Image (cartoon, rainbow, N blue to C red):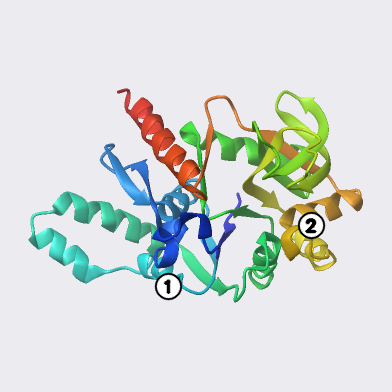
Amino acid sequence: MIKKVVIPAAGIGTRLLPTTKETPKEMLPIFALGRNGEICVKPLLQAVFEQLFDIGVREFCFIVGRGKGSISDHFASDRNFLKVLTEGGKREMADELLSFYEKVSASSLVFVSQPEPMGFGDAVLRAEPYIKEPFLVQAGDTFILSEGNHNMTKLFSVHKEFKSVATFLVQEVDDPKPFGIIEGEEIESGIYNVERVVEKPEEPPTNLAIMALYLFTPAIFQALKSTPTGWGGELQLTDGIQRLIDSRLKVMAVKLGADEFWLDVGSPQSYWDALSRSYGFFQRMKGV
């Protein structure tokens, strides 16, 4: 059972300005199911946290930057607010928030500062002092819609079966250029032995894009330490994964199913898509 996760959430969110001037993009709302089974809105990062909690993760390492104080504030219990809701006849809302606080209380949360935006790989590397065993990495501005968290189950299963040092999700995309892209052999339906990864290629070798949900062993830290800065002058996690491949270590990828969806809150269009898809997904789960 994987107990630890690193959640990079230090991005500036420039494509969503002016909204993200004071509100981190990771705190923008998406649709989710409340404890009563009804559709509600939750901050994206809360939805990510609760999804990971539900599969057994209990140790959370958030990588945050300047201006992200609202993240730690949101994950701090506010009993006075609960009292105001209860006394105001908003018992159902109070119970929803209390359920979230109980999950936070049952977890260990660490907030690590990334003073400057030096890349996704740099953010992951900053978690090294807290990680001694296999762990997850999930970007704080993405979310996977998968009934019963099947995507997580598949990720764990493939990682264990092939004894890989890195296993991650991929999805076919129309325009691969803005993504990390993989090349590899499809050894089973939707399961790839990864032979090469490249970040934001001008000439993509495939249209299989890396989704920002990974399962690593601590070997990734040594790989990142020996990786030079790459695209955008930043330390790219994709380049660290290539270092693992170059060292002849096993790296695997799992393709998202046709009924699973990757949500990205990074631009106005992708945020609109995230809202539309999350609402439709949870409508279907309710049988509407």
Mark 2 Cα shell of 10 Å, populated few (<14), some (14-19), many (≥20): many
Relative to residue 68, is residue 209 depicted above or below? above
- Of residue 148 and residue 15, the one placed in the foreground of this image is 15
Relative side of 230 to 39, left or right: right
Q: In this figure, which residue is indicated by the disc labeled 1? A: 69
Residue 61 visible: yes
Quarter residue 40 falls in: top left
Residue 172 visible: no
- Of residue 262 and residue 47, the one placed in the foreground of this image is 262
Q: In this figure, which residue is indicated by the disc labeled 2? A: 240
**SS category of the residue bearing label 1:** helix
Residue 127: x %, y % from top left: 64, 68
Residue 42: x %, y % from top left: 35, 50
Residue 111: x %, y % from top left: 52, 71
Kind of residue sitting beneath label 1: Gly
Count of numbered labels shown in the rendering: 2
Q: CA distance from mark 1 to mark 2?
A: 29 Å
What residue is shown at x 49% (from left), y 66% (from top)?
Answer: 108
What residue is shown at x 34% (from left), y 29% (from top)?
Answer: 283
Residue 100: mark in rendering: none
> Where's the C terminus, which quadrant?
top left
Nearest to N terminus: mark 1 or mark 2: 1
Quarter residue 85 falls in: bottom left
**SS category of the residue bearing label 2:** helix
Relative to residue 248, is residue 228 depicted above or below? below
Residue 57: x %, y % from top left: 53, 54
Mark 1 Cα shell of 10 Å, populated few (<14), some (14-19), many (≥20): few
Relative to residue 107, is residue 152 depicted above or below? above
